[in-house]
Amino acid sequence: MLIHCSLTATHGSVCSMKMSISKRGACCSVVGCSLRPGTNLLSQIKVYRFPKENVQRDAWIAAVKRDGWIPTSNSRICSSHFISGKPSDDPLSPDYAPTLLPHNQKQPQSQTNRLVRYQRSVRRESAAQTQEIMDVCLQEYQSQSHRDISVGTDLCMTEIDHLQRENAALKYRVETLEKQLQALLSEKAELGLLDLKNDKIIVTQYKDPFKRVPLSAS
């Protein structure tokens, strides 16, 4: 804010003050450009500080082409010198440094085409990265599925092995019982309690159960 004040004393101590107030933003550093941001919110002109990063800062200084000039903390470049209206931090972007300059002979349409090609390449790169991420996720999913199947197969084989051992034990038990039954039948046959040929049990009544004397012996 600039305030200009003049004080004039006349006879009778009459004082008059003239004040003029002007509010203006920083002026663009490009030679021949007098644009600056407006004082109202509707202004489309914006100004940008020179980058702190040395490589991009040097690119801006080279684009301005002012011999021996070094920008200060107050130096700005307005949005009219960038194709998209604002700078980009991407070195591959045409707006990495200002290009719409009086000494630049390229036509605005050519500069716009550069921006369009850059945006198209960014979209392709983004799509490629997205596809790469999807491929990695798919591989991880398939790998996990394969591990799950392997674990499931291992569990099935364990269960089968357990059942086979259990079946073998049952077979051995049946064979043992059959042998015991056969021995018992043979013993009864020898005692005359079983007719092995006719597969009949012989029932004999005894007068003296303790001495096993049949009734027919009396």
Image (cartoon, rainbow, N blue to C red):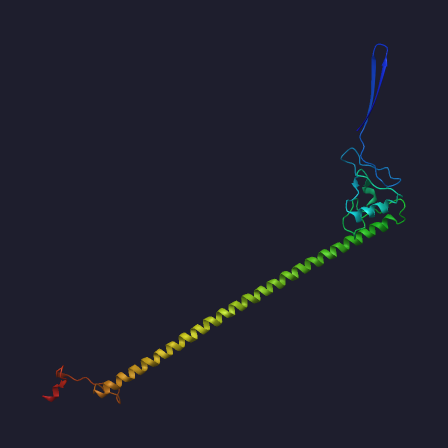
Q: Is residue 43 left or right of residue 200?
A: right
> For this rendering, which residue is in front, 133 or 70?
70
In the rendered image, the vertical position of residue 137 relative to residue 83, given as above or below: below
Q: Position of residue 127 (x, y in %)?
A: 71, 57
Q: Position of residue 23 (x, y in %)?
A: 80, 30
Quadrant occupied by the C terminus: bottom left
In this view, 23 is above or below 192: above
Q: Which residue lies at the image location 80% right of the left edge and 52% below the top edge? A: 116
Toward the top, the furthest residue is: 12
- Residue 59 percent coordinates (x, y): 83, 48
Q: Residue furthest left?
A: 218
* Residue 100 can be seen in this image: no
Horizontal and vertical percent for residue 119? 77, 52
Asked whether, in this view, residue 149 is left or right of residue 176, the answer is right
**Looking at the figure, which quarter contains the N terminus?**
top right
Camera-nearest residue between 193 and 94: 94
Residue plotted at (26% across, 86% down): 186
Q: Between residues 9 and 133, which one lies in front from this camera angle?
A: 9
Identify whether 7 is placed above or below 70. above
Task: Answer yes or no: is residue 144 visible.
Answer: yes
Q: Residue drawn 51% across and 68% down?
A: 152
Q: Is residue 217 above or below residue 75?
A: below
Give the tally of numbered discs.
Answer: 0
Quadrant in the picture for residue 123: bottom right
